[in-house]
Image: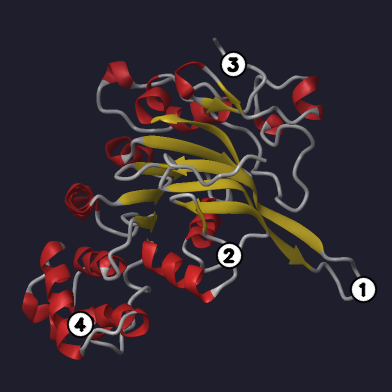
Amino acid sequence: MTDPIKENAPLLNAIGLKKYYPVKKGLLAKPQLVKALDGVSFQLERGKTLAVVGESGCGKSTLGRLLAMIEQPTEGELYYNGQNFLENNAKTKALRRKKIQIVFQNPYASLNPRKKIGAILEEPLVINTTLSAQQRKEKVLSIMEKVGLRPEFYDRYPHMFSGGQRQRIAIARGLMLEPDIVVADEPVSALDVSVRAQVLNLMMDLQDELGLSYVFISHDLSVVEHIADEVMVMYLGRCVEKGRTAQIFSNPQHPYTQALLSATPRLSPHLRRERIKLTGELPSPINPPKGCAFNPRCWKATEKCRETLPPFERYDGGRLISCFHIDQ
């Protein structure tokens, strides 16, 4: 393998990330492995947004937890500016905590109801910095201003805020250590429709102002189309298609991507697609199908698809696709 550390390295480079969970079926039975993430690779450039989409159970939230160091990968490599981010030493772990932060899905559950907002936002600074109490408070008020929260909110509790305000608080907490990368795990799915646009626009404004890069995990493709630069489509722990947002939405190639986009509501009649209804359930990650994991539900599947895993190949325009039946 060539040395991944190079001068023009991407901000974040993930290579073959895997996460397996052992599951016991009985007292004497041999544990089986749930392959939640089974070899995902991607690159993230500074100031860009990579959206990760797919059905529930496809592994997108597992990927987010691995990036945010909530869990460790079973296998794989992760590089930040060419530096190995999986080295098991205190210095690397501290850098990773600082450079990659996460915003969780549910703002009602992710904030401690017993602490005031000021204390919640200061906690990352208490753990990871040597700032004085006054310096911490000044920084908290500065970040609160950036996300549209008034100074008097500093001494209030989470239950005193609306869902949109709580998610702004969660975003502010994610920005306290001045990260380069924010993993946003379904950050607007728990919010009212009227509030979603405000939070999304806030995230895009912060990206422009602070040069943030986002890994944006979502099942809402209309939101993804609005915010993402690139889209990675996942199915049963693997990436099946990855490319620029305009490429994916204008001309999806993998059958699974085509089915996902056909279910996206469109106001303009000329933008609507013929609905592709998938039959069957998502296969078990304990016992995935042989060959292409999508073959039991795919209308294009052949015997080759049932026997051989299609390679993840690069096609025109830099798009990556794992399928034997691509319309060139």
Q: Nearer the viewer, mark 1 or mark 3?
A: 3
Looking at the picture, which amino acid does disc 2 mark? Glu
Q: Label 1, label 2: how many angstroms apart (C-alpha)?
A: 36 Å
| Residue at the image position 7 percent from the left and 72 percent from the top | 150
Quarter location, residue 132: bottom left
Q: Which mark is residue 136?
A: 4
SS for callout 2: loop
Looking at the picture, which amino acid does disc 1 mark? Leu
Callout 4: 10 Å neighbours few (<14), some, many (20+)?
many
Residue corresponding to mark 2: 87
Q: Label 3, label 2: how many angstroms apart (C-alpha)?
A: 39 Å
Quadrant in which the C terminus appears = top right
Residue 174 screen position, x and y as percent? 31, 66
Looking at the picture, which amino acid does disc 4 mark? Arg
In terms of depth relative to the viewer, which is nearer, 327 or 319? 319
SS for callout 1: loop
| For marks 4 and 3 on the same chain, the one whose residue lies earlier in the sequence | 4
| Residue at the image position 60 percent from the left and 70 percent from the top | 88
Q: Which mark is residue 28?
A: 1
Q: Which mark is residue 326?
A: 3
Q: Nearer the viewer, mark 4 or mark 3?
A: 4
| Residue at the image position 33 percent from the left and 45 percent from the top | 46
